[in-house]
């Protein structure tokens, strides 16, 4: 059970006994436990049982091995959330390759930087997706490096139309490679790309164990079963994709993989398939509520999700009243929130037996095997109810940053190995965590991290901009919106939001990082140390 030790110290329940040495172990266990049960389906009309999933992954692994992919081969992939991506993930895990998932919205600036650092030798992507030419981008990156890497294209829509999978596969019955041995302590097989809190993207390193054990929080908190269906609408390249796939393999939870989310059509498709759980970021929850309201306007008796047990919320603190609104409008237990980061996924998770008050204002309790500390600026532990920085320790802790020696990240840990998250919070008497702010200068929009300094550095190169501060402001739809506060250059004509957007795109800034709000000041407020007082700006423009 949850407990506390010294002041400011909290622990989740004891770790369960179902941890796996490798990610592939989870695939084999599920195929043995429920071979004929549907495990995965997508919104393109395809599905796989647990045994079919394992078999497809083995055949793909054999084909990739024939191409020279094996233990230690670095494979970067940028793919939508489809059956192909899930199969590829576990096929690469079977081979012991180092995979580098890249979310679809990142562009050449970030992709080229991280894949060069990772020394990628194989790139896998779609020809096009949502109007963007991913093939052209990857070919340009490969050409820039002298053509030394391979490119594999995955045309999932064409394959779905033919009823197959768009991955190289050996014929059924052909020999398949043996599973790779477990990775050693700290030996990374996953490199997650995140903008984090600095201008340059970071490669966050994880092992098979650290990725898979993060599923403990979901399995213990939501208690999924093979009777449940959870549609994944977020990019599966997020670390949450591998975590939820691990949760599926551990519990038998069925996953519905959504290629491209449409706020009008997708919520109804999820309803048609009998979703019992929904998530995970605020914009998706708003879409589900909107779809229910639209159906109820036609027929007051319509319940769009009659089997709904709960919804998930993660990636950013939820707005006030969301739990109550979801429970009232959609049904089920309301919102089960979680808190974590790429470096430490699912540190906390709400549970079905939490009270409504706890579900309303907190992000749950520490997950099984997780230790949490709350410390003040002096490093002393904070008692329950007192705000402090949140520090965490547990088996899902990342293995380091790509290309960064361990000694250079030592300051991110305290003397006992607890990771300093940079997030501020208050912990209640039963261990429930309420996020109150963060030290990191990062904006979380649609559960995506936007580094303010990266946006500022690009916007400041616009000739009309003398100085700019980029801040996050509360937004009921996206959680936060990116706001640029500009001091114009002397004699410059006022610049428009569209001008700054065009400038940012031309400089290689990803679209989701563009400012959505523009404000002007003659002088930006500053602290006694001369730094821009962003807290004052947030307060002013929030009001």
Image (cartoon, rainbow, N blue to C red):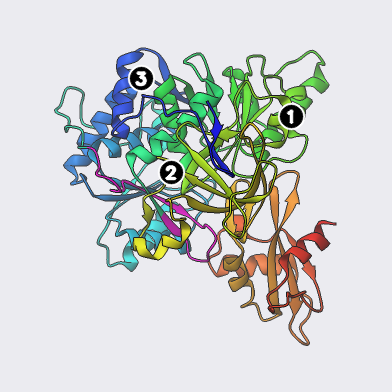
Q: Nearer the viewer, residue 420 or 373?
A: 373
Residue 347 image point, x, y percent: 52, 39
Say left or right for 335 vs 99. right
Q: On screen, 181 above or below 459?
A: above
Residue labelled with disc 3: 50
Mark 2 element type: loop
From the image, give the main secondary structure of the stretch colored magenta.
loop
Residue 79 badge = 2
Quarter where residue 294 is shown: top right
Circle 3 or circle 1, nearest the eye: 1
Say left or right for 363 vs 25. right
Residue 42 image point, x, y percent: 48, 27
Magenta stretch holds residue 405: no
Q: On screen, 434 above or below 164?
A: below
| Mark 3 surroundings: few (<14), some (14-19) or many (≥20) residues within 10 A | many
The residue furthest left is 175
Residue drawn at x 42%, y 29% as measured from the top left? 15
- Extent of the magenta region: 182-203
State if disc 1 and disc 2 touch (CB < 8 Å).
no
Q: Answer whether residue 238 is visible to the viewer in this image.
A: no
Residue 357 badge = 1
Magenta stretch holds residue 188: yes
Q: Looking at the image, tell me whether mark 2 or mark 1 is earlier in sequence order.
A: 2
């Amino acid at each position: 059970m949850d407990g506390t030790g010294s002041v400011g110290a909290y622990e989740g329940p004891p770790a369960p006994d179902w941890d796996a040495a490798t990610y592939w172990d989870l695939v084999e266990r599920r195929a043995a436990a429920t071979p004929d049960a549907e495990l995965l389906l997508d919104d393109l009309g395809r599905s796989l049982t647990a045994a079919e999933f394992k078999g497809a992954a083995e055949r793909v692994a054999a084909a990739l091995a024939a191409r020279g992919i094996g233990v230690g081969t670095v494979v970067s992939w940028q793919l939508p959330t489809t059956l192909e991506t899930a199969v590829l993930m576990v096929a690469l895990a079977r081979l012991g390759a180092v995979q580098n998932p890249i979310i679809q919205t990142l562009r050449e600036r970030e992709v080229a930087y991280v894949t060069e650092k990772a020394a990628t030798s194989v790139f896998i992507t779609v020809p096009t997706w949502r109007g963007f030419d991913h093939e052209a981008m990857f070919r340009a990156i490969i050409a820039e490096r002298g053509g030394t890497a391979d490119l594999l294209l995955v045309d999932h829509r064409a394959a779905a139309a033919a009823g197959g999978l768009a991955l190289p596969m050996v014929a059924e019955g052909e020999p398949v490679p043996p599973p790779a041995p477990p990775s050693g302590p700290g030996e990374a097989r996953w490199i997650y790309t995140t903008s984090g809190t600095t201008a340059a993207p970071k490669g966050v390193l994880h092992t098979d164990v650290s990725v898979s054990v993060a599923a403990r929080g979901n399995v213990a908190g939501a208690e999924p079963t093979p009777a449940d269906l959870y549609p994944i609408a977020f990019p599966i390249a997020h670390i949450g994709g591998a975590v939820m796939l691990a949760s599926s393999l551990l519990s038998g939870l069925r996953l519905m993989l959504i290629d491209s989310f449409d706020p009008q059509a997708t919520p109804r498709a999820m309803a048609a398939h009998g979703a019992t759980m929904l998530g995970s970021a605020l914009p998706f929850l708003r879409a589900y509520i909107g779809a229910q309201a639209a159906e109820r306007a036609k027929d007051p008796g319509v319940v769009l999700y009659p089997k709904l047990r709960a919804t998930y919320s993660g990636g950013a603190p939820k707005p006030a009243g969301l739990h109550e609104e979801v429970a009232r409008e959609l049904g089920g237990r309301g919102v089960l929130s979680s808190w974590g980061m790429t470096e430490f996924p699912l540190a906390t998770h709400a549970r079905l037996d939490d009270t409504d008050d706890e579900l309303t204002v907190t992000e749950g309790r520490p997950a099984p095997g997780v230790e949490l500390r709350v410390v003040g600026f002096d490093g002393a532990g904070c008692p329950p109810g007192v705000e402090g920085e949140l520090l965490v320790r547990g088996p899902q802790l990342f293995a380091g940053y790509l290309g960064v020696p361990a000694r250079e990240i030592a300051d991110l840990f305290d003397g006992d190995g607890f990771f300093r998250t940079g997030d501020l919070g208050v912990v209640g008497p039963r261990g429930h965590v309420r996020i109150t702010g963060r030290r990191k200068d990062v904006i979380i929009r649609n559960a995506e991290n936007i580094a303010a300094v990266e946006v500022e550095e690009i916007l400041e190169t616009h000739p009309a901009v003398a100085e700019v501060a980029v801040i996050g402001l509360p937004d009921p739809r996206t959680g936060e919106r990116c706001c640029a506060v500009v001091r114009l250059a002397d004699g410059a004509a006022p610049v428009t939001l569209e001008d700054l957007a065009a400038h940012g795109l031309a400089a290689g800034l990803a679209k989701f990082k563009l400012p959505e709000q523009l404000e002007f000041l003659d002088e930006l407020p500053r602290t006694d140390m001369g730094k821009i007082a962003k807290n004052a700006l947030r307060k002013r423009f929030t009001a």
